Amino acid sequence: MERIHEILDINIFGNVDVEQLLKVILIFLAGFFLIRATRFMLNRCFKKNANPQTRMLISKMVDYIGFALLMMIILAELGLKLSTILGAAGILGLAVGVASQKSLGNIISGIFLVTEKSFEIGDVIRVGDQTGVVYSIDLLSIMLKSFDNLLIRIPNETLISSNITNITRFPIRRLDISVTVSYKDDLTHVMETLKAIAGENTNCLDEPAPFILIKDFADSGISVQFGLWFDKSRYVDTKNSVMQDIHRRFREEGIEIPYTHIKIVNE
């Protein structure tokens, strides 16, 4: 019972007068300015030799370490009795320790990811069933901005153990379109028409050459894979224009795209 009264009567801070409070405020302002100045100088130093995600990671580390040290200095100046608090709140200390282990794993994974350079800020990546633009790279996680304007947070430990597809890493991409044609159509004619479509479309590149593959014999027709190369920044324009060209040219050339018919018979 006496022990409980001792815990409840803990004086966390000593007697704080106005002069000491002003001193704490000055320490905070000076520390805040020093952290910001350090961030600015490091960003200037690494501007030419480091990519955006490395500079962002350095800035985050300066913030975390700097504000942690600043908080410890301020609490020490206020006379915080850390030993008493830890003795009275052992469960809280254990929870913080477990959380720190998880955070440490994310930090280490983040360092590996930055060193590996598998993606950068602005890249479009796919992690599992999540796809988006790399919006931010932090010590513990990365942020993706999805194409429907949602913010997705993925922990670094999840990234390090997952397959990551960088969709925009290279300057050009290949667009694969699956086309089904009727069994009665001449496949040579179909392939020549697809080559002409790729050659006439200004969004398609001449090199590498278009890729055309007769895939298989499906139930309703013959499946053909049509692959063409384009600049990665013109994905929407390329796909829309090529789909329109296929629909128009097939109709002009008499190439049939089979589809399921439903016949209703009235008796």
Image (cartoon, rainbow, N blue to C red):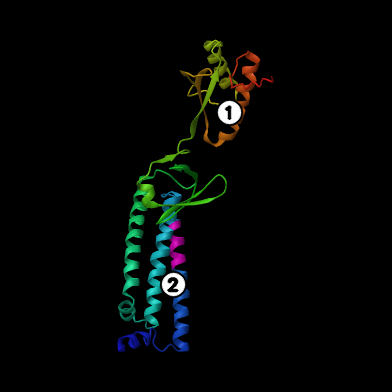
Q: Relative to residue 22, is residue 32 depicted above or below?
A: above
Write down the region rendered in magenta.
35-43
Residue at 54% x, 13% y: name it: 183
Amino acid type for the residue under numbered disc 2: Gly
State the SS at label 1. loop
Residue 42 shown in magenta: yes
Asked whether 147 or 47 is in front, the reply is: 147
Total tally of numbered discs in the picture: 2
| The C terminus lies in quadrant | top right
| The N terminus lies in quadrant | bottom left
Residue at 39% x, 87% y: name it: 14
Q: How dense is the environment of label 1, judged by Cα within 10 Å: few (below 14), some, or many (20 and up)? A: some
Q: Is residue 266 left or right of residue 202?
A: right
Q: Residue 17 location in percent, x, y? A: 45, 89
Residue at 57% x, 16% y: name it: 193
In front of the other: label 1 or label 2? 1
Asked whether 228 or 185 is in front, the reply is: 185
Q: CA distance from mark 1 to mark 2?
A: 54 Å
Asked whether 148 or 57 is in front, the reply is: 148
State the SS at label 2. helix
Which residue is labeled 2 in the image?
31
